[in-house]
Image (tube, grey):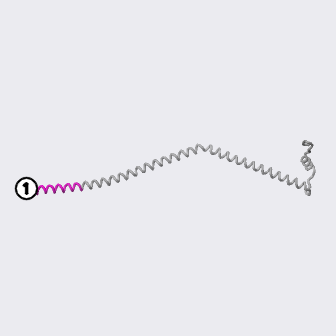
Amino acid sequence: EVGYRITDSWDEIVETLQGAPVSIDTKLGRYKREFETRVRQDTDEIYMRLDDEQTERQLLAGRRNMLFRDRRAHAYTRHLMETEARMSQEAWVRATDASDLVRGKAADRRRQTVILELLRIDHRRSTKITELRTALQGQVTALQG
């Protein structure tokens, strides 16, 4: 009796079913088999989900532990990559500077060649002017004299 003069009929049914042989032909026997099958399937599904959850947790814990162990290696790899990037940038700057220097030297050589050519032309003109002035002075002296 559960209380308030209510009898627990479920317990009586279970006790009756456990004691009585189950006949395949009876409706109650079929319900009992379906109930047992459903309970077994539900229990199997619950255990399967628990196993899956446990496996997933173990996998995640393993990954977390692996990442934790590899933390130093990842930090060192990051440091190496940053150092390589910085050195590559510095090498690029040096190469650009060297290229600019070579271009500047080539431009300086071209300028020096042009200046030397202009100096030769100026020297020839100066020589020619000196010759013409000397000839002109000779003519002026001849006319005065």
- Foreground of the two, 135 or 5: 5
Residue wearing tag 1: 144
Residue at 44% x, 49% y is 93
The location of residue 137, given as percent across then percent down, is: 12, 55
The location of residue 64, given as percent across then percent down, is: 65, 45
Could you tell me which secondary element the residue under label 1 belongs to? helix
Residue at 78% x, 51% y is 45
Residue 125 location, quadrant:
bottom left
Is residue 22 inside the magenta stretch? no
Residue 123 location, quadrant:
bottom left
Q: Which residues are magenta?
A: 121-143
Which quarter of the image is occupied by the C terminus?
A: bottom left
- Foreground of the two, 139 or 76: 139
Pick out the residue farthest to the left.
145
Is residue 124 inside the magenta stretch? yes
Pick out the residue farthest to the front.
4
The location of residue 70, given as percent across then percent down, is: 60, 44
Residue at 31% x, 53% y is 111
The answer to whether residue 65 is above or below residue 26 is above
Residue at 80% x, 51% y is 42
Q: Main secondary structure of the magenta part?
A: helix
Q: Is 142 situated left or right of 39 in this image?
A: left
The location of residue 124, given as percent across then percent down, is: 21, 56
